[in-house]
Amino acid sequence: MRSLFSKERWKTLFYTVSHPADGYYWIRHQDTGSVWIAVLLVVLFSLSFSLNRMYASFVVSDVDPRSVASLQELGGVLLLYLMLCVGNWSVTCLMDGEGRFKDILIAVGYAMLPMIVTFNLATLVSQIIAENEEGFYAIILIIGIGYTAMMMLTGIMQVHNYTLGKTLLTLFLTLFAVFIIIFLVLLIFNFITQIVTFFQSIYYELIFRT
Amino acid sequence: MNTIKRMLIIALLLCVLAPSALADLDLPYDTYTYDYWGNVRFTPAAYAPVSSVSGTDLTYNGEPVGAFSSPQDICRSPGGLFYLADTGNNRIVVLNEAMDTVINIIDGFELDGRRQTFDAPTGVGVSLPGALYIADSQNRRIVALNPDGTLFKVVSNPQSEVLEEGYVFTPLKVCVDYAGRIYCIAQKMFEGIMVFDTDGRFTGFFGTIEVKISLWEKFWRRIASKEERSKQKLFIPTEFTGIDIDDDGFVYASNIDTDGVQAVKRLNPRGEDVIKKGPEENLGGDLWIGGYTQYSGPSKIVDVVYRSDGIYSLLDSLRGRVFTYDHEGNLLYIFGGLGTQRGTFTTPAAIEAVGETILVLDAYRAAILVFGETEYGALINEAVALRYDGDETKAVAKWEAVLRLDENNELANVGIGKAYLAAGDNEQAMLYLKRGMNKSYYSVAFKRYRNAILRDNLGIILTVVIALIIGLVVLFQIRRRRRAAGKGGNRPKRPKYGHDGGKAVST
């Protein structure tokens, strides 16, 4: 928690954004990163995402602001973040990845910064945009998403000491892992409800018979 | 105590005597429209039931007319008479303009000296000179009668190469344009509307509906064997259901669209669809069509009527609604519903309009239901008519009155916003156009507003930009010097990928 207030750690964050390969390397090998900052960035991204959906000008956005539930979106983003990291961790563990779970959390979390900046910037720019100028708005968003994707890729590559091809392969397998996780979670939920209803029915049976 | 009592009495009296503002609540149906996002938005009633006309109320020459039997079509002549196709009774009932007196009952005509009768006449149409065209469906012919009841011509057994061998001509609906061309919707004729020239010769098809096959269906047909394919359902276009002609000779034709996207076409003389779709890109009636009840599914549009000033109404038999659109395809209001109360339908079959009054013919109830516009409906109709004529400034007063009754009305907001835009008040225009969710006009207003601000503050903006550039240049120079002096915290170089042969060393 204290790392949130460390100047050095924040400096590392910005260094990582401007020099992804270097930054992630030192995060892995000298522990210069901070999981708390990474989680904070993910939360901030979720907020920027919701803000964009709510307040982007109606010229560029077709979203009904009344339909945006920012807390739900926050939950969804955090869950996705967790599942991605767990999925990646479980795959890379088996594929000679050098990264610890902590490093993966940081690699993905730090990569959110470009999206946070560009989503908010796009929301602001959308206020001074008219029809036929939506391109500017779109290009800001595309740059942000592209930079984040690039950072995430570099991050995963660096913390695991992988080559590009292997990184792409593990990312693909990560998706599979995520699907398996979702499947298992649903299965467990289903089983638990069945067990609960089983004991419930025993209880009701006892109550009604006595 | 006394004063309180008196106040209570006054309040009570006000409740009782209050004018019909609350009377809308008595209507057996909701009036609504869809907003920019496709959500249902309830509005004040646009139309209210006025009366209904059934055969049992009427007499002709002192004798009772008798209940109509499954009437299928109603048509108003240019002279103001109503022709009702009383299908089950094989007759045409002619009513006067007020629909309280029967002027004539046509149940046959003379052909070559022999008396001929009708068999299930399902459609009627009247030409400009007043000739009556009857789709005599089970006799497989269209009969045209002069206003005095004598035979004008009979159209039957169309001959053409494009028609299949042994095709049985069963006309359902019929319409005549200003030149005397006959447009006919025939049963099981999927190629389009059949057009006959003034001599009654079949000239061709008009406004073909294209078949929609999804990629998925194409895929399955591809891998199916010939035998399987013969058992699959055929992909045939839907038939037209209703037809009307506007003042310019354009044909409005309704059809049942299974996707609920476009249930009406406006066909130009070449048979091309030139209808304008509104912001929703939807002319198919209801947008909320999901679910698995008997009331779900796309609206079943059974008839269309062109009213005036570009306004047309569609009749839905699935949920008993009347949808009204303007010439730009904007949805104006939706009213009506199924039921047995006054003002609801059981099986709506046809729709007709007289001025601003809407008539709906209910086949099962065998009655004509008359709907009159309310204050709200009248204001919208008038405002749209003024806009149609290009009188947008005059329409503003109407739109403002609409907003007093229904403050979220998008069309009204756009109408007022456009007027402000024309008057040069960009800020007000932006406010109203944003409320009306009109992107293009909002953008016009916003661009003007933005340019004005830029023009007025050009000096300041340029100064700030130049100052920023100078500041950045200076900053970079300072940083570079510092780095050259060795003050920058440079990190050691990281090794290349795979630097330690894959052996992880935790630090």
Image (cartoon, grey):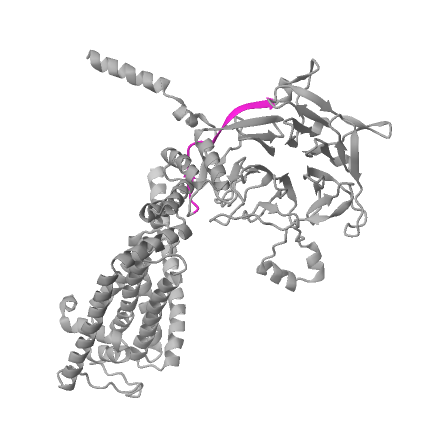
Q: Which residue sits at x=79%, y=30%?
A: B151
Q: Is residue B338 left or right of residue B444?
A: right
Locate residue B123, reporting x and y percent. 69, 34
Vertical relation: A99 (above or below) B177: below
Q: Viewer-proximal residue, B181 or A191?
A: B181
Kindly report the secondary structure that dominates the magenta region of the rendered protein: strand
Q: Can you give x and y, in whole percent of width and height, for residue B111 in the image?
A: 83, 30
Nearer to the camera, B108 or B119: B108
Image quadrant where residue B87 sits? top right
- Which residue occupies 54% across, 47% down? B260
* Residue B108: image location, x then y, percent: 78, 27
Q: Residue at x 31, y 75 (%)?
A: A156
Q: Which residues are magenta?
A: B38-53
Q: Tell me if A76 is positioned left or right of B97 in this view.
A: left
Number of disc labels: 0
Residue visible at 37% across and 55% down in the picture: A61
